[in-house]
Amino acid sequence: MRIAMIGTGYVGLVSGACFSEFGVHVTCVDKDAGKIERLKNGEIPIYEPGLDDLVARNVAAGRLSFTMDLKEAMQGVDAVFIAVGTPSRRGDGHADLSYVYGAAEEIAQHLDHYTVVVTKSTVPVGTGREVEAIIRRVRPEAEFDVASNPEFLREGSAIGDFMRPDRVVIGATSDRAGEVMRRLYRPLYLIETPIVVTSLETAELTKYAANTFLAAKITFINEIADLCEKVGANVHDVARGIGLDGRIGKKFLHPGPGYGGSCFPKDTLALVRTAQQVGSPLRIIETVVDINDKRKKQMAERIIAACGGSVDGKTVAVLGVAFKPNTDDMRDSPSLDIVPALQAAGAHVRAFDPAAMHEAEKLLPGVEWAKDAYGTLEGADCVAILTEWNEFRALDLRRVKSMLKRPVMIDLRNIYNPEDMAKAGFTYTSIGRPSPAGGMDRG
């Protein structure tokens, strides 16, 4: 089989590379000449573990290629995937579909045989029908079907998610389109992956419903963590106690500074706007969006409180600025609220992230960037952990303590044990856990 993948961002590049690993011939298309040139030279424009090897292997095998020429890419394909960005539209929070609709118009110009046009981008309900209408308007005689195939990839583990998914969701407008999509995913039949085939609208809504549910789950445990701090309970034990219930599940019950990234913030907001537009508001998700926005701003207050109520003239060492580990994605990262708030309060921020600093430098002016975790610490008044990279989980606490002016750690990811930190002589602040003495470890 042959497919074209329009867009070499996170979803397009990972999906294209993984399809080629299945034995499909994939041509990835992008208008960014610089990005295409880098990919042809073996340079991967995003950070995703294992992606460089996967791309190199399939390029060498002749199954994966890159071009700016959509007409060339569409020759003889069974399907063409739209995997362009759908950012939040400025001013109203709706998904910006201009790139999707632009891709649909260009696809229409080059259709010369039956092709399934697949929306891989996260798009609101009704987008697939509009894509179909655009193509019909441009090329009334074209032979094609539209399908929706939402992605469920987690940054940092996207290749595994694609190769061993919980499910594949396909919204198809015809049996013929459904059969093409089943053939593409046939390798997953061997591991008995559930294939859910449904309507366009249902597939589109399924993606948003999944992301907003997970965002709500994160926000729920964050609020429970705040309650734990008031009543002396341990949020980790609460999370374990409820997560062992099969109806709830243990995933996404880790308290932190709020969700970020390329999906949850824009998708929750887009679904809220869609629901309001059709007169069926989602009050729960509206509240989730509001709570999460406020929470990220509140995290700077925790750091300031741990430093005695003021960071004016003080140096704050920050470990991790990406929204999660194993990615360089800075989109809606809590650090984008926390770091500027600390700077506004008079702090000098010295930071390190294993992958995201090249992106963060553009977004966080005035930060001093260190070469490694220990490079942030010398003479700092406190250290704050914002991202739970593995290399931050086993720091030499004696060394950390010796480098800081005061042994103050604010652990917004709860990766250390309060008892261990107390024995090491730290003033330790985490989220939703009691201190060894019985009070809250809020510094």
Image (cartoon, rainbow, N blue to C red):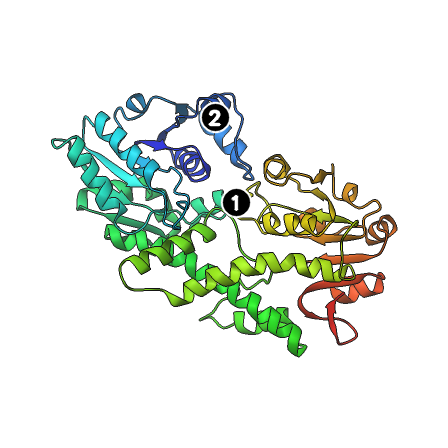
Q: Residue at x 74, y 38 (%)?
A: 370
As drawn, the label of residue 392 is none
User: What's the residue type where badge 1 is placed?
Assistant: Arg
Q: How many marks?
A: 2
| Other residues around mark 1 within 10 Å, as few (<14) / some (14–19) / many (≥20) | some
Query: Based on the displayed image, in which of its 4 quarters is residue 196 positioned?
Result: bottom left
Give the residue at mark 2. 35
Q: Residue at x 40, y 39 (%)?
A: 85
Query: Based on the displayed image, in which of its 4 quarters is residue 14 positioned?
Result: top left
- SS at circle 2: helix
Give the residue at mark 1. 331
Q: Furthest-bottom residue in view?
A: 231
User: What's the residue type where badge 2 is placed?
Assistant: Lys
Q: Please state the horizontal and vertical placement of residue 211, each as a whole percent of the image.
A: 42, 56
Of the numbered discs 1 and 2, the one sitting upstream in the chain is 2
Q: Furthest-right residue in view?
A: 402
Q: Residue at x 76, y 58 (%)?
A: 310
The front one of 420 and 131 is 131
- Asked whether residue 149 is in view, the answer is yes
